[in-house]
Image (cartoon, rainbow, N blue to C red):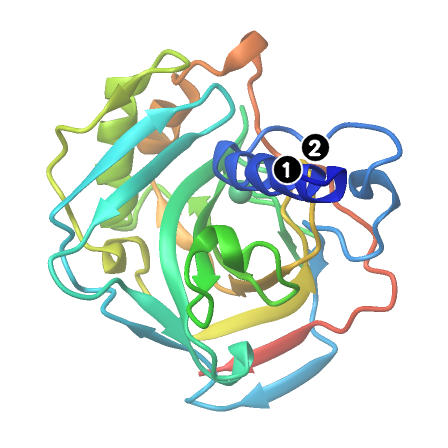
Amino acid sequence: MIPTRIIITIILTSSYIQLCISDKPARGSGSICNTGKRQSPIDLRPHTFFHDPSSLQLINYDFVPERFEVHNDGHTVHLKNFIWADNSPFMTGKSLKNERYIFKGAHLHWSSDDHSGSEHSLVGKRFAAELHLVHYNGKYNSSEEASRHSDGLAVMGVIYATRNYQIPNAGMKLFASLAQTVKQPKESNDEVEPFPLSSFISELDELYTYSGSLTTPPCIENVRWIVLSKTMPISPKIIHMFRNVRLSDGHKNNVRPLQALNNRVIQLYKI
Ligand SMILES: [Zn+2]
């Protein structure tokens, strides 16, 4: 017979992984979503500043995956189930205590207008969309095991602002096309033309880092956030393609409200 405590642990763990991937809106009174002191997203403005080229390294980000899948879970569109010919992409550097965080999957947050679609705000301002590149700590055997530890996850947030007269970000253009193939909730498509993660990042220059949580239930506070401080360009046409994707219950946005900073320190690194 399995002791009750172990069963509860298993249930919590499996729901954690599933929700980490499914990205449902944060609700539920009495949970850490409401009582936690290190919740995300937050307004980002720097407390401390470091100029250090070794603060963040993106390794293998230019690798083209063998395959992956696009999936609309009714709350966001995911890129998941990546298969890599060689090694997976990972990020490391001083902002991550020099630990390796292995890429797991990506999803997007957006809304019906250009000024409320990013989850984090940059010095009081929100933008059209925010991509989350979810990574788990490579010192654990799997993402499931990592998620049980306080240093288990690191998420890179890349914020996109609508700009008409700049070359739009290449990755978002490809992602938007894929999203058109899963416009209805629960649709998936695994016949996609793979492209590298580096397509999402036009410029790596400065980043904010702080300790926070998943922005969806169960809101567990084991995420090291890396949010690039400079927005990447996205065209009005491309952001509209995401707005045409249907979410569950007719929702027009999948953005959690800003959470209290409490006594956390936000660091700004210039690379
Ligand atoms: Zn997210």
State the residue in front, 247 or 186: 186
In the picture, measured across the screen, residue 164 lies left or right of residue 73, that is left
Q: Residue at x 14, y 44 (%)?
A: 194
Where does residue 231 sit, x and y in percent of width and height?
46, 56
Cα separation between marks 2 and 1? 4 Å
Query: Is 139 located above or below residue 120 in the figure?
Result: below
Residue 26: numbered disc: 2
In the picture, measured across the screen, residue 30 lies left or right of residue 242, that is right
- Secondary element under disc 1, as helix, strand or loop, is loop
Q: Which residue is mark 1?
A: 216
State the residue in front, 10 or 73: 10
Where does residue 61 sit, x and y in percent of width and height?
25, 65
Q: Amino acid at mark 1?
A: Thr
Hey, which residue is sitting farthest top in the picture? Answer: 249
Q: Are the two marked residues, 2 and 1, in contact with CB atoms closer than 8 angstroms?
A: yes
Within 8 Å: ligand 1 and the Cβ of disc 1?
yes
Q: Residue at x 53, y 41 (%)?
A: 17
